[in-house]
Image (cartoon, rainbow, N blue to C red):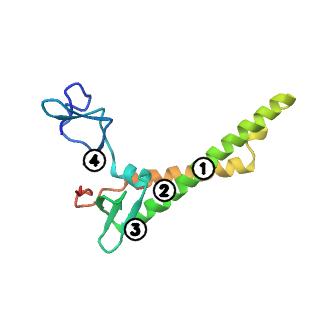
Protein backbone atom coordinates (compact mmCIF):
# COMPACT_ATOMS: atom_id res chain seq x y z
CA UNK A 1 0.00 0.00 0.00
CA UNK A 2 1.06 3.55 -0.68
CA UNK A 3 0.24 6.95 0.73
CA UNK A 4 -1.31 9.20 -1.95
CA UNK A 5 0.71 12.24 -3.10
CA UNK A 6 -1.99 14.60 -1.78
CA UNK A 7 -1.54 13.31 1.79
CA UNK A 8 0.47 15.26 4.35
CA UNK A 9 2.22 11.95 5.19
CA UNK A 10 3.31 11.35 1.59
CA UNK A 11 6.77 12.88 1.94
CA UNK A 12 7.63 11.13 5.19
CA UNK A 13 10.42 8.62 4.86
CA UNK A 14 9.53 6.78 8.06
CA UNK A 15 6.78 6.61 10.63
CA UNK A 16 7.32 6.39 14.38
CA UNK A 17 5.58 3.01 14.38
CA UNK A 18 5.08 0.09 12.01
CA UNK A 19 1.33 0.54 12.45
CA UNK A 20 -0.97 3.08 10.83
CA UNK A 21 -4.65 3.81 10.97
CA UNK A 22 -6.43 4.99 7.84
CA UNK A 23 -9.87 6.13 6.82
CA UNK A 24 -10.12 4.66 3.36
CA UNK A 25 -8.29 2.20 1.11
CA UNK A 26 -8.59 2.91 -2.60
CA UNK A 27 -7.34 1.01 -5.64
CA UNK A 28 -6.57 3.05 -8.73
CA UNK A 29 -3.44 2.10 -10.62
CA UNK A 30 -2.10 1.03 -7.18
CA UNK A 31 -3.54 0.58 -3.69
CA UNK A 32 -3.53 3.76 -1.58
CA UNK A 33 -4.59 4.49 2.01
CA UNK A 34 -6.12 7.91 2.50
CA UNK A 35 -6.06 10.00 5.65
CA UNK A 36 -3.54 7.85 7.46
CA UNK A 37 -1.65 8.42 10.70
CA UNK A 38 1.01 6.48 12.50
CA UNK A 39 -0.21 4.77 15.68
CA UNK A 40 2.29 4.57 18.55
CA UNK A 41 2.51 1.20 20.26
CA UNK A 42 1.59 2.84 23.58
CA UNK A 43 -1.71 4.03 22.10
CA UNK A 44 -2.44 0.54 20.82
CA UNK A 45 -1.82 -0.87 24.30
CA UNK A 46 -3.99 1.77 25.97
CA UNK A 47 -6.94 1.85 23.60
CA UNK A 48 -7.21 -1.59 21.97
CA UNK A 49 -10.27 -3.67 22.69
CA UNK A 50 -8.43 -6.74 23.98
CA UNK A 51 -4.85 -7.03 25.26
CA UNK A 52 -3.31 -10.38 26.23
CA UNK A 53 0.10 -10.55 27.95
CA UNK A 54 2.19 -13.61 27.04
CA UNK A 55 4.66 -13.57 29.95
CA UNK A 56 6.76 -16.56 28.85
CA UNK A 57 7.12 -15.25 25.29
CA UNK A 58 7.82 -11.62 26.30
CA UNK A 59 5.00 -10.54 24.00
CA UNK A 60 1.59 -8.92 23.91
CA UNK A 61 -1.26 -9.86 21.57
CA UNK A 62 -3.58 -6.97 20.76
CA UNK A 63 -7.14 -7.67 19.59
CA UNK A 64 -6.18 -11.31 19.10
CA UNK A 65 -4.04 -10.74 15.97
CA UNK A 66 -1.33 -8.07 16.47
CA UNK A 67 1.70 -9.56 18.21
CA UNK A 68 4.23 -7.16 19.74
CA UNK A 69 7.45 -7.97 21.58
CA UNK A 70 7.21 -6.44 25.06
CA UNK A 71 8.60 -6.68 28.55
CA UNK A 72 5.87 -8.49 30.56
CA UNK A 73 6.21 -6.04 33.47
CA UNK A 74 5.62 -3.07 31.19
CA UNK A 75 2.69 -4.85 29.54
CA UNK A 76 1.06 -5.52 32.91
CA UNK A 77 1.59 -1.88 33.90
CA UNK A 78 -0.17 -0.81 30.70
CA UNK A 79 -3.06 -3.18 31.42
CA UNK A 80 -3.38 -1.72 34.92
CA UNK A 81 -3.23 1.78 33.49
CA UNK A 82 -5.93 0.85 30.93
CA UNK A 83 -8.21 -0.25 33.77
CA UNK A 84 -7.57 2.96 35.70
CA UNK A 85 -8.15 5.08 32.61
CA UNK A 86 -11.40 3.27 31.77
CA UNK A 87 -12.63 3.67 35.36
CA UNK A 88 -11.75 7.36 35.34
CA UNK A 89 -13.59 7.92 32.05
CA UNK A 90 -16.67 6.11 33.37
CA UNK A 91 -16.66 8.23 36.55
CA UNK A 92 -16.22 11.43 34.53
CA UNK A 93 -19.10 10.56 32.22
CA UNK A 94 -21.36 9.60 35.13
CA UNK A 95 -20.40 12.71 37.16
CA UNK A 96 -20.88 14.99 34.17
CA UNK A 97 -24.39 13.66 33.71
CA UNK A 98 -25.13 14.16 37.43
CA UNK A 99 -23.66 17.68 37.42
CA UNK A 100 -25.73 18.60 34.37
CA UNK A 101 -28.87 17.35 36.12
CA UNK A 102 -28.00 19.29 39.32
CA UNK A 103 -27.39 22.48 37.33
CA UNK A 104 -30.73 22.07 35.55
CA UNK A 105 -32.52 21.57 38.88
CA UNK A 106 -30.69 24.48 40.49
CA UNK A 107 -31.49 26.73 37.53
CA UNK A 108 -35.17 26.07 38.17
CA UNK A 109 -34.77 27.27 41.73
CA UNK A 110 -32.19 29.96 40.89
CA UNK A 111 -29.80 28.85 43.67
CA UNK A 112 -26.90 27.42 41.68
CA UNK A 113 -23.40 28.13 43.02
CA UNK A 114 -20.31 27.07 41.03
CA UNK A 115 -18.22 26.68 44.20
CA UNK A 116 -20.47 23.88 45.46
CA UNK A 117 -19.56 21.85 42.37
CA UNK A 118 -15.93 21.30 43.49
CA UNK A 119 -16.23 19.30 46.71
CA UNK A 120 -13.94 16.72 48.28
CA UNK A 121 -15.01 14.00 45.82
CA UNK A 122 -14.20 16.24 42.85
CA UNK A 123 -10.79 17.11 44.30
CA UNK A 124 -10.05 13.42 44.86
CA UNK A 125 -11.08 12.66 41.27
CA UNK A 126 -8.77 15.42 40.01
CA UNK A 127 -5.86 13.99 42.03
CA UNK A 128 -6.58 10.51 40.62
CA UNK A 129 -6.73 11.92 37.10
CA UNK A 130 -3.39 13.68 37.60
CA UNK A 131 -1.80 10.44 38.83
CA UNK A 132 -3.09 8.52 35.80
CA UNK A 133 -1.80 11.17 33.40
CA UNK A 134 1.60 11.09 35.12
CA UNK A 135 1.67 7.28 34.80
CA UNK A 136 0.88 7.54 31.08
CA UNK A 137 3.64 10.11 30.61
CA UNK A 138 6.14 7.90 32.45
CA UNK A 139 5.27 4.82 30.39
CA UNK A 140 5.39 6.76 27.11
CA UNK A 141 8.86 8.04 28.01
CA UNK A 142 10.24 4.49 28.39
CA UNK A 143 12.53 3.44 25.55
CA UNK A 144 11.08 0.91 23.09
CA UNK A 145 12.14 -2.75 23.31
CA UNK A 146 15.52 -3.55 21.74
CA UNK A 147 13.93 -5.70 19.03
CA UNK A 148 12.04 -2.70 17.60
CA UNK A 149 8.88 -3.54 19.49
CA UNK A 150 6.58 -4.47 16.69
CA UNK A 151 6.31 -7.66 14.74
CA UNK A 152 3.29 -7.52 12.44
CA UNK A 153 1.72 -10.94 12.23
CA UNK A 154 -0.51 -12.18 9.51
Q: Secondary structure at mark 1?
A: helix
Give coordinates of residue 77: x percent, y percent: 45, 63
Dot 1 or dot 2, earlier in sequence: 2
| SS state under label 3 | helix
Q: Is residue 123 left or right of residue 44?
A: right
- The residue tagged 4 is 19
- Towards the viewer: 110 or 134: 110
Q: Are marks 1 and 2 in contact (CB under 8 Å)?
A: no
Mark 2–mark 3 distance (CA, rounded to whole Å): 14 Å
Q: Nearer the viewer, mark 4 or mark 3?
A: 4
Residue carrying label 2: 82
2 and 3 marks in contact (CB < 8 Å):
no
Q: Nearer the viewer, residue 6 or 147?
A: 6
- Lower position in the chain sequence, tag 1 or tag 3: 3
Residue 116 numbered tag: none
Q: Residues within 10 Å of mark 1 (few under 14, many from 20)?
A: few
Q: Residues within 10 Å of mark 4 (few under 14, many from 20)?
A: some
Q: Earlier in the sequence, mark 2 or mark 3?
A: 3
Q: CA distance from mark 4 to mark 1?
A: 28 Å
Asked if disc 4 and disc 1 are in contact, CB closer than 8 Å, the reply is no
Q: CA distance from mark 4 to mark 3?
A: 23 Å
Q: Which residue is mark 3?
A: 73
Quick one: SS at disc 4?
Answer: loop
Q: Is residue 80 left or right of residue 142?
A: right
Q: Between marks 1 and 2, how big is the CA–CA gap?
A: 12 Å
Could you say where residue 39 lies in the image, as x and y percent from the top left? 33, 45
Amino acid sequence: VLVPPSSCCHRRDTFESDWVVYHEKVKTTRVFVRECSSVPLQAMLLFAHHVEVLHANHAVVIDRWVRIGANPRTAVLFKTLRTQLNNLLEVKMRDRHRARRRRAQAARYDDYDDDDELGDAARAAQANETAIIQNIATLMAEPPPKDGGAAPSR
